[in-house]
Image: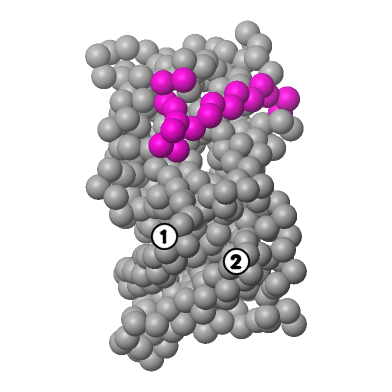
Amino acid sequence: MAELFKISRRRFAHLLGAGAAYAVAHRGTALGSASQAAGPTVPLTDATSIVRLNSNENPYGPSPLALKAMTDAFSLAWRYPDEHADLLIETLAKINGVNRDQILLGDGSGEILKMCASAFTGPMSSRNYRPVPLARPTRGGALTFTPGRGKMIVADPTFEAILNHARVNSAEIVKVPLTKTFSHDLAKMLAAASEGLIYVCNPNNPTASITPKNELREFIAKVPRRTMVLVDEAYFHYADSPDYESVIPMIKDHPNLIVARTFSKIYGMAGLRCGYCVAQNETMQRLRPHQTWDSVNIMALAAAIASLSDTDQVTYGRRLNSETKRELVQELDAMGYQYIPSHANFMMIDVKRPVRPLIDALKQRGVQVGRAFPTLPNHMRVTIGKQPEMETFLSAFRQVIG
């Protein structure tokens, strides 16, 4: 087994050497046109004329190094992915400045959200709560407690998948409307806190808005230890505001904090399904029983490992997204349409009327945008695609609002 692990490492060392030249050849040196993708795009259906701006996907796809790594991993498809999972965990632990036992992989961050809902939400019961002193004391010598299962507290609107998992557990769901600036109303979420789980998506989906870093830090420090806090940082790499930062560094002082990340967005791996979370080891022990064995496949693991070595993937992806989004904003300003300031790879546009008919009209013209959200009935969620895709969107948008 040890030798197989060494072979895997040698394969990746070889891959990264060969992949560097591959990346230069496929990326080119110019960033002027958003149509020059980071990697090749292969259509999977005959509906090539459809412009899909409905799922917040990265239109530039995976890193060239990731594509090469997947090709190299074809010959290993007959093996279970243990060695590759170990290597990815080791790499992520080093990047995030934590121990290996503080990283848990998932089949996309979606599996992470499901595990958290399964572990920490459910019908309130005194039997769910049992005080357990940790092996080591917390700061000040106070005891911390194993949290029981309880209600789910979320913003409204936010990413809805985790709500479905909580409903399966028969958990009470508390929805707290966003503030007027579309940040999480942390004071009201804190007031509702008890046993269970608080979910904070930051940047938030579907609004692409952020919750200021100082407010979030203070909130996490005040949440009772028996209440878990899950911060979903799926769009972390796109947020470049000085008022935003990751809360992963806070994990060392907060055993009730979990941070979820994904390779679906900036790394362009939505179809491969690979994500992870960071938390203290005691929290991981609560999550692991809810995890599916070997839920991340060997192709996704190979691609993720290679992606982390390609610093250009994040830099180019963020830059291309920002440039194209800026051009879209200029067009919307010229047409007199307002929008929620975006800190992600999508936008919420106020279309000044019920959005459902416009969504249908755009679909008839070959442009798919995000679904309607009941709490924002006049807003349209649009993924930032490549420049030609956004030009097609704008052309169709002008037609349906005319």
SS of the residue at dot 1? helix
Whether residue 251 is visible here, answered yes or no, is yes
Disc 1 and disc 2: Cα gap in Å? 14 Å
Look at the image and say whether residue 181 sits in the magenta stretch.
yes
Q: Is residue 153 above or below residue 106?
A: above
| Residue found at the very far bottom of the displayed protein | 25
SS of the residue at dot 2? helix
Query: At which x and y percent is residue 363?
Result: 71, 66
Query: At which x and y percent is residue 292?
Result: 65, 47
Labels 1 & 2 near each other (Cβ < 8 A)? no
Look at the image and say whether residue 304 sits in the magenta stretch.
no
Mark number, residue 209: none
Q: Which residue is mark 2?
A: 397
Q: Which residues are magenta?
A: 169-188
Between 22 and 292, the residue placed more toward the observer is: 22
Residue, x 58% and y 68% (percent of image)? 398
Q: Which residue is mark 1?
A: 333
> Does residue 143 appear left or right of residue 60 in this picture?
left
Q: Earlier in the sequence, mark 1 or mark 2?
A: 1
Between 383 and 88, the residue placed more toward the observer is: 383
Residue, x 42% and y 17% (percent of image)? 224
Between 82 and 376, the residue placed more toward the observer is: 376
Residue, x 44% and y 84% (percent of image)? 36
Q: Main secondary structure of the magenta part?
A: loop
Residue, x 36% and y 70% (percent of image)? 323
